[in-house]
Image (cartoon, rainbow, N blue to C red):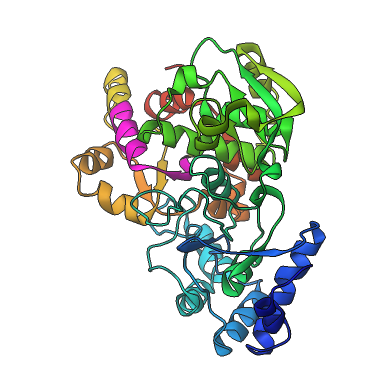
Amino acid sequence: MILTEEQKAMLDGAQGEVMSKVMQSVIRYGELFGAEKLVPVTSEHNHLVTSFGLKMIGPIYDLMNQLIEAGAISKQTFSLDPRPVDPKVPANFIQKLIFNKFMYSKQDFYENQLEQLGLMDKNAFTCACYLDEVGNKPKKGDVLSWAESSAVVYANSVLGARCNRNSGIIDIMGSIAGYVPYFGLLTDEGRKASWIIEIKTSKKPEAQLLGSAIGMKVMEDVPYIKGLDQWLGSELNDATCAYLKDFGAATASNGAVGLYHIENLTPEAKEMGDALIKEDAQVYVIDDAELQRVYDNYPVIWKNPDAKPKLCFMGCPHMSLEQLKSWTDRIEKSLAEAGNKKVVIPTVFTSAPAVIEEFEKTEYAARLKATGVVLSYICPLMYMNNPLCGKMPVITSSNKLRTYTTARYYTDDEILAQITKGGKDA
């Protein structure tokens, strides 16, 4: 790898042994992917994926202590993925015992380490760090050292920043070094599409279902999506960004997509158009029948497939302010139609602490609370990692949560019907 004099000095120990090891980690990571050089991280903030104080990850705490003691802290302040536990979220005594004593018993200790390393603030825990209320929204062209697949794909696609799908720990190594390897989605060639996706549906496709179909087809490749703008328009307003947040999370978790382009909508597609498409790009046509085929082939891994749901999670990734408001309206209307005052299945909406704070200032907050819905900052995935929670029949409209846990996926309309009326038909 070609290094600058400054990079060589850091590698040779000019800033101490620990910083030398940080540089070694970044360089070896780049060499694995054929990177020939390092480039500076240019974003104002970083985002880390490892936000949970699991008792079993002792080596990470040791590593963090070494970094802190050596003064090798992040060159950027950073946000993190959501906290794993919230007392407001339904859990019985034994489930709570497992959370607090056997799983996430090191949470407070770990958060203290994170504050010393460069945590933005005590509420910067969310997988949707790019939301306006959170304050970690990179600019077009910024080079990032982020992890968290749903955040990376959003930053690349919707914001036009540049970031590879980094793993946990590599994310902070790049931020401490101030450099990341130049390969993949950081390069112009790596951002070109090798798939053309033609949307030929009769109505606006479900974001999470469409993202799932594309992710499973193209895997880690870059798709260029045509025909979706007829349903989303050509402006990145709040509702469209919320749609793309959920769509991208599904492409990244059901496949390994780190970047997508949408014709006439996302920034690079608007600028370059078909010039982003490789000559030998494959074509995948998605119509109503294809989406139904994908939906019908999701496995049901509940012990009893006919069990009555005991919990519903919405917000993986975290819900936006616009989604919290629109879902409050939808739930109220559906409850009124059913003659119910509160949701009939315990339901948890999850969002970023900063978004919740803004939501609480609106008249929607009291209205949502009156429906019986719990609003939390929790990570649903971390909740479902509890083996006792994983055995529960949990429903969700998140294809990410479906992919990584035992939760069962339903469309937004089906979820609405189940939590307000007790059935799948709205």
Instruction: Tell me: 178 left or right of 216.
Output: left
* Any part of residue 55 in sight: yes
Q: Nearer the viewer, residue 108 or 245?
A: 245
Residue depicted at x 53% and y 53%: 383
Task: Provide the major secondary structure of the magenta segment.
Answer: helix
Q: Does residue 398 appear in this view?
A: no
Q: Position of residue 312 (x, y in %)?
A: 47, 38
Q: Residue furthest front?
A: 5
Residue 210 spot, x, y in % from top left: 59, 26
Q: Quadrant of residue 324?
A: top left
Give the total of numbered labels.
0
- Looking at the picture, how far across and down is residue 161, in whole percent? 53, 49
Looking at the image, which residue sits at the far top?
A: 202
Q: Which residues are magenta?
A: 314-331
Front residue of 407/221: it is 221
Q: Is 124 covered by the magenta stretch?
A: no
Whether residue 107 is situated above or below residue 237 in the rendered picture: below
Residue occupying image coordinates x 48% and y 17%: 230
Quadrant for the N terminus in the image? bottom right
Please state, as top left, top right, bottom left or bottom right, where the C terminus lies in the image.
top left
Left or right of 106 in this view: 12: right
> Is residue 266 or residue 373 the one in the foreground?
266
**At which x and y percent is residue 20?**
70, 83
User: Which of these two is toward me, 296 or 182?
Assistant: 182
Above or below, 251 against 182 in this view is above
